[in-house]
Image: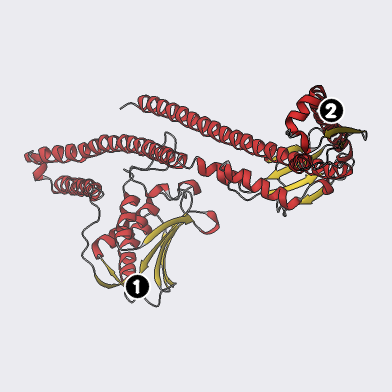
Amino acid sequence: MRKSTIWLLAVVMAFAFAGLLYLQVNYISEILKTRSEQFNETAKKCLFQVSKNLQQDETRKYIEDDLNKELGNYQYQTFDAQRLREQLNSSSTSSQESFQLQIREPDGTTQRLELHSFSNTQSQPLSSLIRKQSPSNIVSRSTELADSYKRRYLYNAELINEVVVSMLNASRLHPIEERIDFKALKNYLTTEFVNNGLNLPFVFSVINKDGNTVYQSGEIKNPPIASDVLTAALFPNDPPSRLNYLRVYFPTKQDYIYNEVSFIVPSVIFSLLILVTFTFTLYIVFRQKKLSEMKNDFINNMTHELKTPVSTISLASQMLKDSDITKSPDVFKHISGVINDETKRLGFLVEKVLQMSLFERQKATLKLKEMDANDMIANIANTFVLKVEKYGGTLDIDLRAEESAIYADELHLTNVLFNLMDNAVKYRRQDVPLKLLATTWNENGKLLISIEDNGIGIKKEYHKKVFDRFFRVPTGNVHDVKGFGLGLAYVRKIVEDHSGSIRAENGAGNKGTKFIITLPLIKS
């Protein structure tokens, strides 16, 4: 797949994910905003009802007080009609008797109703006497009684209106703390909030007309945001200059709203999981693309390198067929030497291919045995010193490790140290004599081995990358040293398969390179 195609797919996927994430964020914000508005509307509705309840309580109180005060000045006089009837019917005298009924009107005037009875000798009931004697008087008196009750009703209605007006005028003059029972106010608020589904802890305060806090039900730890404090007017019919306010704050409002939209959390988690997976996949694709390119370069380079010794060996073998050459011992020896050198070179290239195949396995098959690291390094130094001296360099060893017994595969670990020393020779500075130092020491119960040189060195940003397969430090278009980028990758793999680690550092005085290998001791 072409790199441009991968980038195009990456851009499309990134755009799609960004759009999805944008829609989710907008959706969540809209839900939270709607929930918050619904919460505020419900709470304001509750505050309005509480204010209405307080108004009704105050109105009821003043009406009762004023009615008890005003109506206590009026007395109603009643008479027992049955008793009057009995007295009239049981009269034993023949002389005419008169009865007077006195009625006091609300305005203070009195009216008298006079009834007459006669002796029993007439043997007539009271009702017939009344009909015979005064039919017009009874009708007129009934009309007068109806008018009296009407006037009394109108008077009482006017009295109630006066009480209400006086109450409104009088109550406004009283301080808010005298008009409200704060305990009853808290009960009203709690009841209204619970009935409307807002069963949350709250703190309320009453603010008087001067803007001072008259009462506060609790303590607020952190100053609330102005939008989170709900305000409603107490007794809204008061003049604007005398208005008092009720403020309510819910400390757990945000938690309550977020709990309402808790179903969004899994969606966010899955979106983040998709983002991580997408990023990791993109990284793997580009890494595989880079490895593929490196591998192709390696194969092309390897093919070119293999052709050289094969063609040289082929040419030498053809020359040996010439009888004249076989008769010259010096020429024969030279051709034999060429064939030997090219065969070794070909074997080295094949070994590199085998090393590459080693990386395809999870772990190399090691033949571990107990060995002394100091002795191994001393033997390697005795063998390698000839190559170093060939280029005018020196090889020193400093075996300071008192405990050097390790379990290791001698062949692979020897190859590791040979690779590090061989790199020091390859990447030496031409104008400076090579100095190579191999050191061992103990630290934190482990064995440490360092191979240090004074060569061209490795930039700090490449200290970790040099252990990657097919990686070579960029040197522009100049490639003085042939290589495939497998040597240090092989070194790291073998060391890690020995349960150890390796790192690269700058040499002494920031000159050259220093590789430090850490291996576990047998006792640990």
State the image coordinates of residue 71 (x, y, percent, origin top left). Answer: 85, 41
Which residue is the site of mark 1? 521
Residue 280 image point, x, y percent: 39, 40
**Dot 1 surroundings within 10 Å: few (below 14), some, or many (20 or more)?**
some
Q: Can you say whether 209 is above or below 386 in the image?
A: above
Rendered position, 385 above or below 123 = below
404 or 197, which lies in front? 197
**Label 2 is placed on what type of residue?**
Arg
Residue 65 vs residue 477, the one in the foreground: 65
**Which of the image's four quarters has the N terminus?**
top left
Residue at the image position 44 percent from the left and 72 percent from the top? 444
Q: Secondary structure at mark 2?
A: helix
Note whether 395 is above or below 14 in the view shown: below
Q: Residue furthest top?
A: 136
Q: Secondary structure at mark 1?
A: loop
Q: Give how far apart the Cα atoms at labels 2 and 1 are.
A: 119 Å
Q: Nearer the viewer, residue 14 or 390?
A: 14
Position of 382 compared to 328: left or right?
right
- For the question of whether residue 462 can be seen, the reply is yes
The circle drawn on residue 151 is: 2
Residue 22 appears at what percent x and percent y?
A: 50, 29
- Disc 1 residue type (three-letter): Leu
Quadrant in which the C terminus is drawn: bottom left
Circle 2 or circle 1, nearest the eye:
2
Can I make out residue 198 in this image?
no
